[in-house]
Image (cartoon, rainbow, N blue to C red):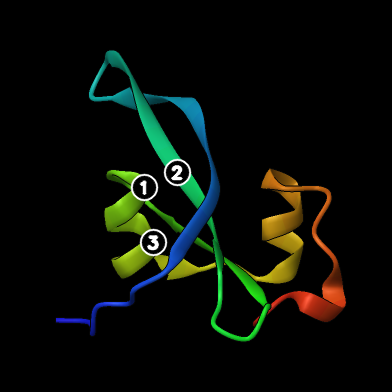
Amino acid sequence: MKKKRRNNILASGTIIFPRNDFGRHATSELRAVLVEGTVGDYAVYLGDGSDDWVSRFGNKASFRMAKAFFPYLEKDKYRE
């Protein structure tokens, strides 16, 4: 199990996209959570679940992916 992170959640967003599930039309969700680090830096975590869960256990997004969700992010403050 991954180590839990404690993060200050600043914002979140969700993309809902269609998928074909054995002939049934269904949707999937991808949540992005922007968190502030302890030294004034930022990171975005991706996953499926609540904001809290994604911020603790989600996968860290690259800066390029993070910009797709939060276009106002600055490269020099982003933690990769």
Residue at the limit of the structure toward the left, as seen here: 1
Which kind of residue does numbered mark 1 sit on? Asp
x and y, in percent, of residue 78 in the image: 73, 75
Determine which residue is flagged by label 3: 55
- Residue at image coords 32%, 67%: 56
Residue drawn at the location 27% of the way across and 45% of the way down: 49
Residue type, numbered disc 2: Arg
Circles 2 and 1 in contact, beta carbons < 8 Å: yes
Q: Is disc 1 surrounded by few (<14), some (14 to 19) or many (20+) residues within 10 Å?
A: many
Q: CA distance from mark 3 to mark 1?
A: 6 Å
Please report contact status of discs 2 and 3: CB closer than 8 Å, yes or no: no
- The label number, if any, that marks residue 18 in the structure image: none
Say which quadrant the N terminus sits in: bottom left
Which residue does the image show at 42% across and 69% down from the upper left? Answer: 7
Residue located beneath label 1 in the image: 51
In this rendering, the answer to whether 66 lies above or below 24 is: below
* 38 left or right, relative to 80: left
